[in-house]
Amino acid sequence: MAKEKLSKDEKFEKVDFDLFEALSALDKKDYGYYDKLTEEQQKKFVPYMMLMWMSAIKGSSGLSSYYVMNTEYTANKYFFNEHVQKHPKLQWLMLCSASPGLGKQFHQWIPHISTNVSKLKATAKVKDIKEYYSKIYPKTDDKTLQEFAEAFVTDHKRKVYLAEVFPNLKLEDIDVLNQLITDKDIEQYERDRGN
């Protein structure tokens, strides 16, 4: 039995989701790109991966900062909302809106902070956080990176403490509580508990 030749459309349907083509479409603010994907390609679209790749580019410090900050402000802020997560096309549109539309950029993968640290189950280490920041801000001097990392770790230790004391609070609530209380409040709380 002879094999049938596939038409161009059938060949396209067999193609996997192309991450770098999608990043290029984001850079161009191609809001219609998601609709051009086949159903199989849409199933292979992983919004979280696109978010991570989208936020980091190699380029001028101003443009790099823009990508990080605008991806956070426009997409990441609501990306994992229980209602938004159900709509990958909406997530695509959010990512498109984060792009400045200046054409193709060189995106790089920035590893994220470990899950245990981000879920407040482990305390962050200055060395790890400094390494993380050095990848996000490669042109920043060592002293500034050290200061950022130390400030992050200090703040993170308070959040870990609050997560242990109030295990039923959501991470967002712990963030809010961390902003509202002071170290003196924590010391007073510990004294009141007899510690």
Image (cartoon, grey):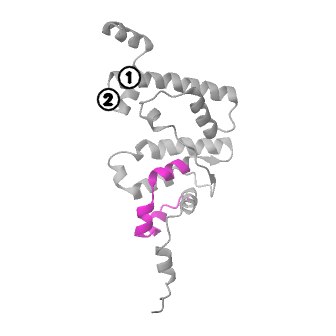
From the viewer's perspective, tell me whether residue 157 is left or right of residue 136: left
Whether 148 is among the magenta residues is no
Of helix, strand and loop, which one carries label 1? helix
For the residue pair 131 and 182, the one nearer the viewer reads as 131
Identify the residue position indicated by label 2 in the image: 169
Main SS, magenta residues: helix
* Image quadrant in which you'd find residue 87: bottom left
Q: Which residues are magenta?
A: 28-54
Q: Nearer the viewer, residue 102 or 53?
A: 53
Does residue 192 sit above or below 51 in this rendering?
A: above
Q: Amino acid at mark 1?
A: Leu
Report the side of 109 relative to 17 (left or right).
right
Q: Position of residue 42 (x, y in %)?
A: 42, 64
Q: What residue would you read off at disc 1? A: 162
Q: Earlier in the sequence, mark 1 or mark 2?
A: 1
**Which residue is painted at 59% across and 43% down in the image?**
66
Mark 2 residue type: Leu
Label number found at residue 19: none
Depth order, front residue of 60/155: 155
Q: Are marks 1 and 2 in contact (CB under 8 Å)?
A: yes
**In the depicted structure, whether residue 130 falls above or below residue 45:** above
Is residue 33 part of the magenta span, yes or no? yes
